[in-house]
């Protein structure tokens, strides 16, 4: 008899990208990070690739990659973001699967997930198949092998979905006790287990019909609850004792296992990844076999049978009503709020989905040999947008050699289908109001699908959609109903090529682009360009081709952007009618710019550009803020110059007042404090900050009690510390680098900063393990190395790493 433990983490983030630009906009609630993906990566996904093991003195002794020791799934939408934005973390997760495969007898710890976290029992047959196939293909492309298991979004289950999984080679899934209705032992009778009285220590077999079956592991919900919401992550030792205590005296192999959201380990519970790492190593020390479901199945095929309760999930006890309307499941933050909007949101989306499906099948039949087979294989284009991949795809699926116009239409139809599935991402219904950011996000996807639907010949469904959404009562007093939310928060965001050109016109006032430049998923090729600048005033007039890199759709436009000075900024765009008209528009606008008294620029723009002008509010939030910052630079520079003059003039007086213990007026400390903060931030941007200058600035801030910008300073200095330790790892005998690091440590301790130390600690541990033994050997022969060894020890002490 052997004892096995398997811990499963469900790591997932919903797609947060603006669907017209495939880019996540800045999310202020995640500050100091750009967005919540970045913040949760820093708090969870990254720490789990290098979780710390502490000794009895709370010093870091080693780091482990938790992903290589547990079972896990990482959603495709999360992995695609990590691949683009955090490739080091992405590759550490992929490598953990390879390392884990060696540990677990050739079975990798990663399993697949239905593609974009759609509630599968509520999906139609086509979407179920595509979600399973996309999830498997995405997994295989990333991990280089076929998945053995698959995560059901919200563990929402029905037999049809499981059959599709089994047909595609999936061997097992995870469910919860209340999702099992009956159990039968070998040769026995069916027994009702609706009371949840079920053995978690064995796998089960579920017959699906047509000769298909799938293995099911039943989540130990009591352990899962204690880890996610109880005290177990406070102490890794107690965590391990809790798991060991689950074993009974049976004489056969037994598995103790549970599954929770992976974000629990670090994001929901700070340092939870460390408790997990310690627990795992402790279990190994206790002689417990760490395993994953695929390995355990190979050793212990299921002998018990079960029947399931279809239409159930792990986060709604009301038969999936949380995602279809009619239940009271909520976050608990807003008691009394109406949740009936969920049903109307799904009804509106179902209307769009069904019309889009019929349109796709009809229009796609003129382009594809089999439209639905083409959709199932479209994941290869989503993951590789290169021309070579696109050409190979059309060679496999086109019904004939497609013209460029036909290729554009085909890709628009496929993008319509992609967004018609993204709009069903489960988070859109999970929270409490249709005006919440999650519901608005899925409505963005619906609007994008609707836009492609209409662009490829579909009828205008927006009024029908709005009529349904108008029945969805909104809890936010700013909006009456779902239709109001759509018209206020969704419709204004819809973007076409003309609007992309307008954004280009506005940003080109402050950025000098090359003739061909990329702007998220669009390529802009400029072939006319006239610009003038006079103090704060500036203008740009030109012509350009805007092309979507996703669909190949393109258009030629004349644009003009103007900044008359102050906060005003606007642009106009019209289709390119020909060279003669371009020069006429250009000359008229430039003449008006040179003689602003004759006619306002805004009136001139309205004369020439139909459809109105574009303003800052039409830009992506990051770009709008960037432009405002550039526009303010001149004014801010003047203010800072005056502050710096005051600093030079009054700093000697401040020294005298300090020596006399006199209070210094805020009229002096505020501008001087601003200058010192700005100087220290600028200094921290140097590749190797000079410790002498660092010490001088720190001394002044402490002497005059200048408060630092704690969050900003902590974030910047933590990043710089990590970079310096990476440099030291490459050049471990460089005392200039060690001196700079110690200077930064003085700033951190002197100003009571709390920087993120993850990158710095990782680099230092590699330095300790790879270079410190050789440096110590040299120190025995050359006293010059004693200073270096002392500096490294001081750095390690600050980082709480055992040296």
Image (tube, helix red, strand yellow):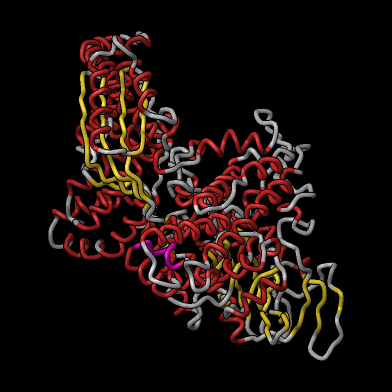
Q: Position of residue 115 (x, y in %)?
A: 55, 63
Q: Is residue 271 visible?
A: no
Task: Judge whether 356 appears above or below 373 on screen.
Answer: above
Q: Name the foreground residue: 774 vs 557.
A: 557
Q: Position of residue 136 (x, y in %)?
A: 52, 72
Q: Image quadrant for the C terminus?
A: bottom left
Magenta residue check for 530: no
Q: Along the horizontal axis of the image, is 120 left or right of 734?
A: right
Task: Judge whether 166 appears above or below 44 on screen.
Answer: below
Q: Position of residue 190 (x, y in %)?
A: 85, 81
Q: Which region of the structure is painted magenta?
A: 380-386
Q: Along the horizontal axis of the image, is 172 left or right of 66?
A: right
Residue lying farthest to the bottom in this orientation: 187
Residue for point 42% across, 65% down: 381
Q: Is residue 43 visible?
A: yes
Q: Image quadrant for the N terminus?
A: bottom right
């Amino acid at each position: 008899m052997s004892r096995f433990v398997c811990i499963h983490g469900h790591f997932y983030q919903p797609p947060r990208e603006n669907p017209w630009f495939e880019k996540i906009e800045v999310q202020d609630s995640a500050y100091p990070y750009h967005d919540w993906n970045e913040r949760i990566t820093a708090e969870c996904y990254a720490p789990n690739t290098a979780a710390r093991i502490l000794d009895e003195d709370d010093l870091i002794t080693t780091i482990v990659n938790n992903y290589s020791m547990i079972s896990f799934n990482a959603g495709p939408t999360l992995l695609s973001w990590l691949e683009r934005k955090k490739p080091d973390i992405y590759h550490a997760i992929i490598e953990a699967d390879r390392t884990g495969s060696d540990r677990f007898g050739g079975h990798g710890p990663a399993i697949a997930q239905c593609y974009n976290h759609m509630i599968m029992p509520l999906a139609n047959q086509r979407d179920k198949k595509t979600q399973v196939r996309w999830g498997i293909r995405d997994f295989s492309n990333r991990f280089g092998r076929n998945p053995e298991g698959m995560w059901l979004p919200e563990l929402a289950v029905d037999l049809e979905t499981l059959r599709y999984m089994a047909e595609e080679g999936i061997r097992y899934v995870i469910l919860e006790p209340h999702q099992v209705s009956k159990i039968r032992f070998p040769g026995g009778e069916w027994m009702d287990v609706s009371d949840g009285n079920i053995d978690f220590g064995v796998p089960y077999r579920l017959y699906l019909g047509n000769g298909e079956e799938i293995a099911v592991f039943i989540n130990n919900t009591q352990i899962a609850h204690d880890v996610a919401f109880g005290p177990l992550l406070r102490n890794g030792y107690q965590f391990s004792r809790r798991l060991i205590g689950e074993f009974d005296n049976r004489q056969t192999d037994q598995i103790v296992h549970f599954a929770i959201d992976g974000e629990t380990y670090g994001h929901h519970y700070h340092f939870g990844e460390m408790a997990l790492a310690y627990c795992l190593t402790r279990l190994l020390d206790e002689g417990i076999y760490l395993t994953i479901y695929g390995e355990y199945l190979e050793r212990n095929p299921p002998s018990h049978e079960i029947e399931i309760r279809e239409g159930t999930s792990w986060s709604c006890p009301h038969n999936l009503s949380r995602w279809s309307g009619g239940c009271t499941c909520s976050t608990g933050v807003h008691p009394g709020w109406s949740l009936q909007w969920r049903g109307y949101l799904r009804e509106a989306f179902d209307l769009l989905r069904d019309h889009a499906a019929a349109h796709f099948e009809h229009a796609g039949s003129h382009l594809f040999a089999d439209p639905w087979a083409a959709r199932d294989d479209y994941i290869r284009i989503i993951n590789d947008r290169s021309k070579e991949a696109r050409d190979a795809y059309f060679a496999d699926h086109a019904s004939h050699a497609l013209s460029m116009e036909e290729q554009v239409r085909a890709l628009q139809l496929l993008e319509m289908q992609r967004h018609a599935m993204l709009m069903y991402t489960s988070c859109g219904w999970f929270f409490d109001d249709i005006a919440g950011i999650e519901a608005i996000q899925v409505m963005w996807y619906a609007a994008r699908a609707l836009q492609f639907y209409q662009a490829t010949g579909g009828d205008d469904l927006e009024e029908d959609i709005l009529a349904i959404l108008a029945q969805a009562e909104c809890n936010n007093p700013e909006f009456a109903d779902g239709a109001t939310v759509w018209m206020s928060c969704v419709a204004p965001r819809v973007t076409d090529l003309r609007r992309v050109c307008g954004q280009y016109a506005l940003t080109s006032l402050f950025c000098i682009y090359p003739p061909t430049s990329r702007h998220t998923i669009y390529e802009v090729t400029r072939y006319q360009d006239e610009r003038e600048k006079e103090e704060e005033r500036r203008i740009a007039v030109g012509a350009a081709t805007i092309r979507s890199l996703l669909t190949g759709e393109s258009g030629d436009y004349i644009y003009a952007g103007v900044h008359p000075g102050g906060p005003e900024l606007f642009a106009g765009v019209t289709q390119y009618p020909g060279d003669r008209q371009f020069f006429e528009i250009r000359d008229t606008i430039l003449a008006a710019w040179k003689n602003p008294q004759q006619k306002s620029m805004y009136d001139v723009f309205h004369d020439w550009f139909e459809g109105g002008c574009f303003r800052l509010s039409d830009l992506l939030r990051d770009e709008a803020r960037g432009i405002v910052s550039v526009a303010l630079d001149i004014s801010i520079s003047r203010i800072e110059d005056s502050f710096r003059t005051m600093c030079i003039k009054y700093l000697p007086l401040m020294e005298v007042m300090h020596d006399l213990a006199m209070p210094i007026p805020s009229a002096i400390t505020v501008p001087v404090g601003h200058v010192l903060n700005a100087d220290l931030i600028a200094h921290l941007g140097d590749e190797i900050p000079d410790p002498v200058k660092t010490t001088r600035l720190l001394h002044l801030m402490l002497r005059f009690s200048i408060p630092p910008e704690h969050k900003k300073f902590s974030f910047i200095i933590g990043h710089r510390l990590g970079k310096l330790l990476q440099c030291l790892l490459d050049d471990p005998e460089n005392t200039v680098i060690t001196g700079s690091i110690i200077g930064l440590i003085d700033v951190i301790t002197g100003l009571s900063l709390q920087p993120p130390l993850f990158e710095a600690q990782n680099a230092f541990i590699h330095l300790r393990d790879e270079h410190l033994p050789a440096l110590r050997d040299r120190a025995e022969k050359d006293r010059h190395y004693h200073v270096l060894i002392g500096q490294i020890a001081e750095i390690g002490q600050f980082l709480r790493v055992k040296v």
